[in-house]
Image: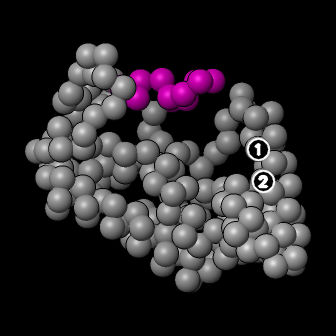
Amino acid sequence: FKLLVDSITYSKMGINGLLRSFQRLKSVQSKGKKSHNILEFRGKRLAIDASCLLYKAAYCCAERLVESIDKMGPEVHADAIAEKAYTGYVLRQCDMLLTHAGIEEIMLVFDSPHRLPLKKGESDERDKKRKENLEEARRLKSLGRRNEAWTKYKAAIKVTNRMAQVAAGAV
């Protein structure tokens, strides 16, 4: 695996120059298609947004992870079981792409550890919503409504810099 970490400038709506930096990796033109079968990329290099993988990975350990982050803070939290679960998911997904889909190489692209000033309002609003979801998850759990609580725990997930570091270290 190769890791590509924040060497590109950011803009309000995305990352300036990202597509140009991956130009050599470009393999399939969309031609009006909105989705592709992964097998169309056999023998190609693939860049993957690591945050997307980590969000999906965090679903398997949502309660442990969210409670750990709330208790210890986003940069300090450490739950060995949750870390093993989400890194295992990332590794399995990458292995599946390499082994079964025939992808030649995977580059995991990690977000910058620094918040963008232009997105402060949006980030603050998301943090507020996560906090509300955590409170609701705890309330539902206390009432014995575990499935509903689990849904709220998933909605309270935030991929942290520590999660990115742990995942990057695992690959």
Q: Is residue 57 positioned above or below 25 on the image?
A: below
Q: Is residue 94 left or right of residue 16?
A: left
Q: Is residue 147 positioned above or below 55 on the image?
A: below
Residue placed most toward the observer, 34 or 113: 34
Where residue 169 sits in the image (x, y, percent)?
42, 68
Tag 2: amino acid: Arg
Measuring 21% from the left and 27% from the top, which residue is drawn there? 28
Residue placed most toward the observer, 136 or 82: 136
Residue placed most toward the observer, 134 or 143: 143
Q: Which residue is mark 1?
A: 126
Compute the Cα span from label 2 to label 1: 6 Å
Quarter of the figure with residue 8? top left
Q: Is residue 11 positioned above or below 92 on the image?
A: above
Quarter in which the N terminus is drawn = bottom left
Q: Is residue 73 visible?
A: no
Where residue 166 sits in the image (x, y, percent)?
49, 68
Quarter of the figure with residue 153? bottom right
Measuring 49% from the left and 75% from the top, which residue is drawn there? 85
Badges 2 and 1: C-beta atoms under 8 Å apart? yes
Tag 1: amino acid: Arg
Query: Which residue appears farthest toward the bottom when viewing the image?
Result: 80
- Residue 18 among magenta residues: yes
- Disc marking residue 130: 2
Q: Is residue 96 left or right of residue 129?
A: left
Residue placed most toward the observer, 63 or 84: 63
Q: Is residue 162 left or right of residue 151?
A: left
Q: Which residues are magenta?
A: 9-19
